[in-house]
Amino acid sequence: MKDPSLRLERAIEVALSGGVLVSGLLLLSGLVAGSHGLLRSGVVLLMLTPVARVLVLTLGLFHERDFLFGALSLWVLAVLASGIWVSVHL
């Protein structure tokens, strides 16, 4: 796989799949064990999975030297981070 855009798509796929898989395992473990902490962790990880996608995309775009879309993606990441910061501090 030599095409940089294909490598970036694959990295995004791995980030999304990994986030959903680990989140599902945490949720299932929480249900089986009756643990609210595991359930909460699974839900939080599931909510953060799209943030991981934007982070991987931003890094990939800058690595490919696509500075315009990298900057736009960085802006989206900053908006997501500010939303998370506000929700944590309310």
Image: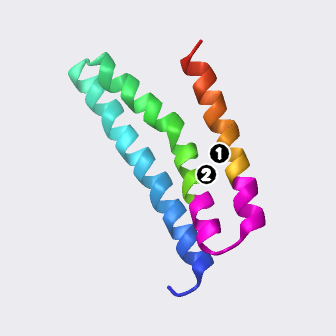
Quarter where residue 30 is shown? top left
Q: Quadrant of the C terminus?
A: top right
SS of the residue under disc 1: helix
Residue 83 picture location, percent across and down: 65, 29
Disc 2 crowd, CA 10 A, few/some/many (<14, 14-19, 20+): some
Q: Residue furthest top?
A: 90
**Image x and y of residue 73, in percent:** 70, 54
Q: Which mark is residue 17?
A: none
Q: Is residue 19 positioned above or below 1 on the image?
A: above
Location of mark 1 (residue): 77
The reply to whether discs 1 and 2 touch (Cβ–Cβ < 8 Å) is: yes
What residue would you read off at disc 2? 54
The region drawn magenta spans 57-73
Residue 37 sits in quarter: top left
In the rendered structure, the answer to whether residue 16 lies left or right of residue 39 reads right
Residue at point 51%, 44% (across, down): 49
Horizontal relation, residue 67 to residue 7: left or right: right
Residue 18 is situated, as x and y percent measured from the top left of the image, at: 41, 52
Q: Disc 2 residue type?
A: Val
Judge whether 23 appears above or below 43 on screen.
below
Mark toward the viewer: 1 or 2: 1
> At label 1, which amino acid type do we have?
Leu
Q: Residue at x 32, y 34 (%)?
A: 26
Residue 89: x percent and y percent? 56, 16
| Mark 1 → mark 2, Cα distance in angstroms | 6 Å
Is residue 84 part of the magenta span, yes or no? no
